Amino acid sequence: MAKREAGVGSTGLGLLVEEHRGEIAMAWRRGVERELAVKDPALAFAVAPLLREMSLALGGDEGRRSRDAWNRCAVLVRSNAGAAQLAREYKVLHRCIWEALRARGAPVSPAERLSVDEWLDEALAEALDRLERVRLRAASFEQYAAVIIPPVARQLRATPPPLPRRAPAPLHSPAQEETILELDPIADHA
């Protein structure tokens, strides 16, 4: 009972996160723009679902449900984001969650804080794992198979195609004489 009295309890913490989800998401967006100078954050589509899934996980079993939640949220992370950018955005999210709860005067025990931080760290790990899988898959599609040119085709390509043939010139036989026509000069009639 003493442990429950020290903080709001995991269920209560989950309800607080859910209640302030929009505020936390807006603070996160402003923080990312201000601190990281990023206009299209990697977590832009994932922040609200992450907060929702975390609030649900804090109220109940964190086993399989959390793994599924991390997978669902990892799919929403931009696949062109760098690992460092993603880690920095999660750091800003951590801070925004705790600042919002502190501003409300919510007492949070060290154990509850640890469970939230661990949940977010696992979500980050799942997002990074998914980014790596996506990059490996994309890289496998970009590699082209070697083109092997058969020797016959290589030889044909090395020499230019032949020029078109001309009709053979008629052969002159010495027995045949050419007739030469002489023309009369044109008289001037002026």
Image: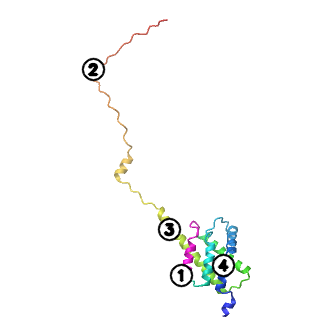
Q: Residues within 10 Å of mark 4 (few under 14, many from 20)?
A: some
| Residue located at (58% from left, 78% from top) | 122
Badge nearest the viewer, 3 or 4: 4
Marks 1 and 4 sit apart, C-alpha to C-alpha, by: 20 Å
> What residue does disc 3 label?
136
Q: Amino acid at mark 1?
A: Arg
| Residue located at (66% from left, 91% from top) | 3
Residues at marks 1 and 4 touching, judged by CB atoms closer than 8 Å = no
Q: Earlier in the sequence, mark 1 or mark 2?
A: 1
> What residue does disc 4 label?
18
Residues at marks 3 and 4 touching, judged by CB atoms closer than 8 Å = no
Which residue is the extreme one toward the top? 190
Residues at marks 1 and 3 touching, judged by CB atoms closer than 8 Å = no
Q: Amino acid at mark 2?
A: Gln
**Magenta span has 162?**
no
Rendered image: mark on residue 100: none
Badge nearest the viewer, 3 or 2: 3
> What residue does disc 2 label?
176
Residue 50 at x, y percent in the picture: 61, 75
Q: Earlier in the sequence, mark 2 or mark 4?
A: 4
Dot 4: element: helix
Badge nearest the viewer, 1 or 4: 4
In this picture, is 189 found above or below 151?
above
